[in-house]
Image (tube, rainbow, N blue to C red):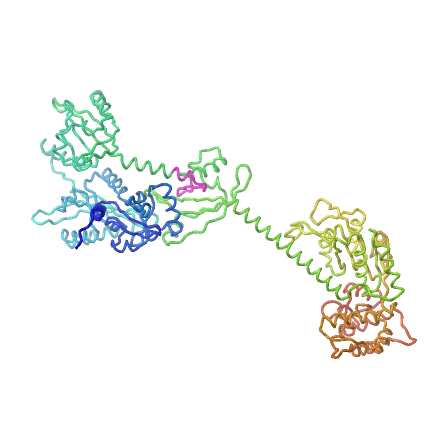
Amino acid sequence: MSTPSDSDQQNMAQRATFDLVGEGVLWIDQQGKIAEANTAAAQILGYAKKDLTQSSYFEINPHFSLLGWRKYWKQLLELGGERLETEFVNADGKLFNVRGRVNFASSQQVHATCVVVFSSTESVQREADLLELVQDHGDIAGWEWNLITGQVFIAPPLRRWLALSPERDYYPAAEFAEILRGLLSDRELSGANSNLEQVLHSAKTFDRIVEVTLADQPTLSLRVRGKSVENELEVYKVYGSAAPPIDRSPQVGLDDQAEALAFSLDRSQDTVYWVDMEGGNIIYANAHALEATGYNRQELLRSRAVDLVPEEDRERFAELVKELPQTDFLEFTSETLCKDGRKFPSRAVLHFRESGDRKLMVAVVQDLSQLREDHENRELHTTTLNSLQEWVIWLDANNRLVMLNTAARKKLSRKTSLELIGQDIAGLMPDLEIPPLAEIREEQLDGRQRAAVDYVFATASGDQRSLQIRFAQVAAGNQLFLCLLCRDVTAEYNNRRRLQQTKRRVDELRKQLESENEALKEKIETAEATGPIITVSTKYQRILAQVAQVADTDATVLITGETGTGKELLAQSIHQFSNRSSRQMVSVNCAALPDNLIESELFGHERGAFTGAFAQKKGKFEIADGGTIFLDEIGELPLDMQAKILRALQEGEIQRIGATESIKVDVRVVAATNRDLESMINDGSFREDLYYRLNVFPIHNLALRERREDIPVLVKHFTKLYATKMGRPITQISQRDLEKLQEYDFPGNVRELINLVERAVITSNTSTLNLGASLRALRRADRSEGLQLGGDRLVSFEEMQRQYIVEALRRTKGKVTGPGGAAELLQLNGRTLLSKMNKLGIDRNEFTR
């Protein structure tokens, strides 16, 4: 077997030493795995040592995740180490407070391991609790059962009375319960268990006389008192005192009194020295002095008081001793030296006493270590709280302020000139609903977390801040407080609101773009379907000459003519041959716009101008700025809109709905109508001034029957167009069919011709265009109403319109608009058809029966 190396022996010695210390020590790697742990760490956390080394740091510290630990690791590389004050979770899943330090191990593998040295802060609180109980009740021995660690603490006097080891002050709860079973009768055990159950489920105390049976000794009576301590969620420890019942026998003699006094002083929690002022020798030291300094009694009685004072304070101590006889007492704050070289901060109250011819100094010394540490912790907590941007406010049971941090004080102090502490929160934060403390406590006990509430805080300057407020119960001593954690989320809310507004604006623009894209597609399809103006007619050449004549001017053009004659094609030609051709032409079908949207479509609107106006929108006039706007079916506009169109033409400016300022626009207007505007002026349905403003350059578009020579050319053009689109190999058209078409009047004009050709292409199965079915349909319509395709008999155009409308109403049983209505059948706008019916005296009710 090989002999361990020096480094191995040193490592083994170090591990053995760490297992002897009372503080917990954990070695943690960069991944958060616990690589090693000492015995104290395992006991404090309630784990078996081997189980603890198979765990991760995140299982015992709920405030860390792997990502958080890696970030903390990098931070420690820069700092080298820092204090630890946090909460750990023991093996039973219970939280408890710990305090200590975090450092990197110094070895050949620098920064390879993080060392966490910690201890439970419950032991610190235990000393304060026990001292308070002794002061309150005058009891002598203390005890404590920590439910989190499962350890029972026994003070030295109680260990002596129960004949326990004087060197051992902690016992596992199960082991100590077994010891009590050997010392107490069944009756006493039953009573003790009953008392413990009582304090575990309530905040009550217990006080009972317990009879202890010791081997070969008389029965010992002890008066045992106890009470529980709980945090916000549960009872976490039970502590108390034990003392023999008060002896009410007659006063003993002087020697007995001195012995009783010494007995009492030995059980005091303060350090007491009697010093002979003549030589400065210590002539008495109580048991606590021995425990505090590490000396035994004989060593202290051979020492002088000044030996316990640091070198730098001895001169000041000597001066105070000289002054002592002239006063009742003096205080001396310094440090006390211990046998092992340690020293702890202390405060001594020095009293002068005379006993016969001896002058004595009685020094009662208090250890300030815990007070100093508590003060440092309070300073740390206060500094941390005051560094927070969140408001932290504590309220009592009556919702009055008891404490607040700097951020909260800065905001709330501007609301009142009075001192904030003691004020009702309702006066500072009106309309804030404060939940009852009992309700918050119940939620925390059940493990439920109340959702944060939103609150709008009005500042003294009138600004409004959006706060998110969380409520928590905080226990301090035997009092409960409500803690308000207020986070200012104004910037987040504003950013979110701006993001939502931007998204709405993007959605609006996207919809507008989609709409414009659809309109562009329609224009492209129209251009593909109709193509350029195709004509061989001499009469139509004169119209094209008018287009060329007016195109390069900015004059307003009014195009009249029957429906389906291609008025928009003329408008496009005017635009294409103008100096505005590089900009777009915007087409608007006035008859297709609902009355409540006409103004918005033409002139636009501002955000919020009306319900549903979530974003600003440009109107057609604004979009057409620099180009041309084509107002088709302008005769269908209501009178109020005619006035606004007139203003746009005369002033060259428009105003969006909801806007306060006008917008200058440079738009060339081309209008079109199939109605008799002069008759409408006489009827009062069209403004005369608008008519004259539009009719600067009138162009009347010819009906197809007035240029019959164009019918064969148009049929060939549209046949080729639709045959290519549908993949039909049509190369021939019957001349006889073309002649028959030339005999037809085409009340629907070019639009009707396009539909007829498209239908013929669909039904054609050979290379010759099948116009037969379309011609038969025309003849049936002719026979049904006496219409003549040829011959000498012709009806007037008005009568022909009347016959077509009557036939359409007969087929639709009086339905005018909507799907399957007469307007759809005749390919007319619904309002246009109703106007024609009114003009021709046609009553649709005659066809509904």
Q: Quadrant of the N terminus?
A: bottom left
Residue 333 in view (yes/no)? yes
Q: Quadrant of the C terminus?
A: bottom right
Q: Is 390 one of the magenta-colored residues?
A: yes
Q: Position of residue 822 (x, y in %)?
A: 77, 70
In the foreground, 191 or 664 = 664
Q: Is residue 753 left or right of residue 339?
A: right
Q: Is 481 one of the magenta-colored residues?
A: no
Q: Say which quarter of the image contains residue 677.
A: bottom right
Q: Position of residue 382 (x, y in %)?
A: 38, 38
Q: Position of residue 510 (x, y in %)?
A: 64, 56
- Span shown in magenta: 382-401
Q: Is residue 631 left or right of residue 1?
A: right
- The residue at 49%/48% (across/down) is 454
Residue 199 in view (yes/no)? no
- The residue at 54%/42% (across/down) is 464
Q: Position of residue 216 (x, y in %)?
A: 7, 48
In the foreground, 207 or 515 = 515
Q: Say which quarter of the image contains residue 295.
A: top left
